[in-house]
Image (cartoon, rainbow, N blue to C red):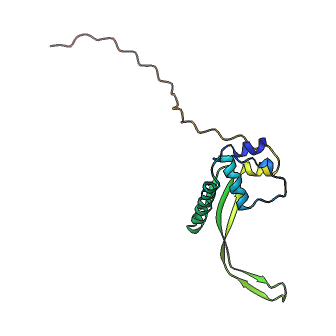
Amino acid sequence: MVLAQQAASRCLINIDISLYKEGVEMNKAEIIEKVAEEAKISKAAAAKAFEAIIGSIMQAFKEGDKVTVVGFGTFSVSSRKARKGRNPRTGQEIKIAAKKVPKFTPGAALKAVANGKAASKPAKKAQPAKKAVSKAKPAKAAKPAGKPGKK
């Protein structure tokens, strides 16, 4: 439970995933129900938020953009080149067309939770850079006043 909280500490909605047993799948309705329960909102509001998130990711895919959720992972579109393949039934060589496919790369916190390891500490916010203080050269001693000039 602690791992789940550490991994989700940067998320807007903290879901206690320790309640779910390994190998048990969650479907869309169960995710919406859990989000509603944890966020203390209605199921309708949770469903609307869920649909907005999925819709935003799909729109980014259409535009060729990637979506990164720090600590969770990155959703992106990957291009596959055209290639030759083989029909497994006939053994005949076939041409496979180029296509784009969705890709998900898990983040460090998600990998840590999946492997039962402690998630790394959240990164500290960057502090503004401090100006380097340069050692000032000692001021030159003032020359003593000379004789008054001729008038």
What residue is shown at x 47% (from left), y 24% (from top)? 136
Q: Residue furthest left?
A: 151
Q: Is residue 1 above or below residue 93?
A: above
Residue 92 appears left or right of 104: right
What residue is shown at x 40% (from left), y 15% (from top)? 141
47 or 119: nearer the viewer: 47
What residue is shown at x 84% (from left), y 84% (from top)? 88
Q: Is residue 108 above or below residue 67?
A: above
54 or 85: nearer the viewer: 54
For the C terminus, the image quarter is top left
133 or 47: nearer the viewer: 47
What residue is shown at x 67% (from left), y 76% (from top)? 81
39 or 111: nearer the viewer: 39
Q: Is residue 51 above or below residue 40?
A: below
For the N terminus, the image quarter is top right
Determine which quarter of the picture holds residue 120: top right
